[in-house]
Amino acid sequence: MFSQVIRSARPLAKAGPSIQPALIQRSFHASRIARDHFLDANDEAFTKRALDEANAKPVLVDFYAEWCQPCRVLTPLLKSHTGPESGYDLMTVNVDDYPDLAAKFKVSALPTVVAFKNGAVKNKFVGFRGDADIKKFLGML
């Protein structure tokens, strides 16, 4: 367990004229946190998270490119629907940096979103989708 001491500039309560600044003890835990967004993942991160057979939490993998305008609009929409409280994780993979990974999952147009659960492909869509279509897609997982 990590801890950090923070000095307060003002006292916690007025008890008399000789109050020294109070020391407040804050602890930080080194426990594992539920991550929700894995942006610009590499081969190793992709294999470790999306292809993990023990991972029952669905992972949406957004295959994108920097130059793709629909990708720039879709990624923030996907971020708004994923996270620890949503039950879905989001991973983005730049196809220009990892063309072999994109080819392995037959990404032929951008954006392409592939949903993985327990290490296997469960569903996918190609092209831009709006808010309602993303909710429908997530409901099918």
Image (cartoon, helix red, strand yellow):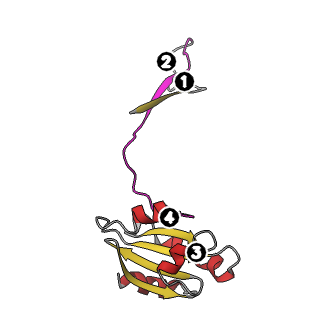
Mark 3 element type: helix
Q: Nearer the viewer, mark 1 or mark 4?
A: 4
Q: Is residue 84 visible?
A: no
Q: Amino acid at mark 1?
A: Pro
Spot occupied by residue 19 in the image (x, y as percentages of width and height): 54, 15
| Marks 3/2: CA–CA distance | 67 Å
Marker disc for residue 43: 4
Mark 4 element type: helix
| Marks 1/4: CA–CA distance | 52 Å
Q: Which residue is mark 2?
A: 15
Q: Amino acid at mark 4?
A: Asp
Spot occupied by residue 18 in the image (x, y as percentages of width and height): 56, 11
Q: Quadrant of residue 55?
A: bottom left
Q: Is residue 122 magenta?
A: no
Q: Which residue is mark 3?
A: 99
Q: Nearer the viewer, mark 3 or mark 2?
A: 3
Which residue range is magenta in the image? 18-41
Spot occupied by residue 102 in the image (x, y as percentages of width and height): 53, 77
Spot occupied by residue 132 in the image (x, y as percentages of width and height): 49, 87
| Marks 3/4: CA–CA distance | 10 Å
Mark 2 crowd level (few <14, some 14–19, many ≥20, 10 Å Cα): few
The answer to whether the residue labelled 1 contacts the one labelled 2, judged by CB atoms less than 8 Å apart, is yes
Q: Earlier in the sequence, mark 4 or mark 2?
A: 2
Tell me the quarter of the image containing the N terminus.
top left
| Marks 1/3: CA–CA distance | 58 Å
Give the residue furthest to the front: 100
Q: Amino acid at mark 3?
A: Pro
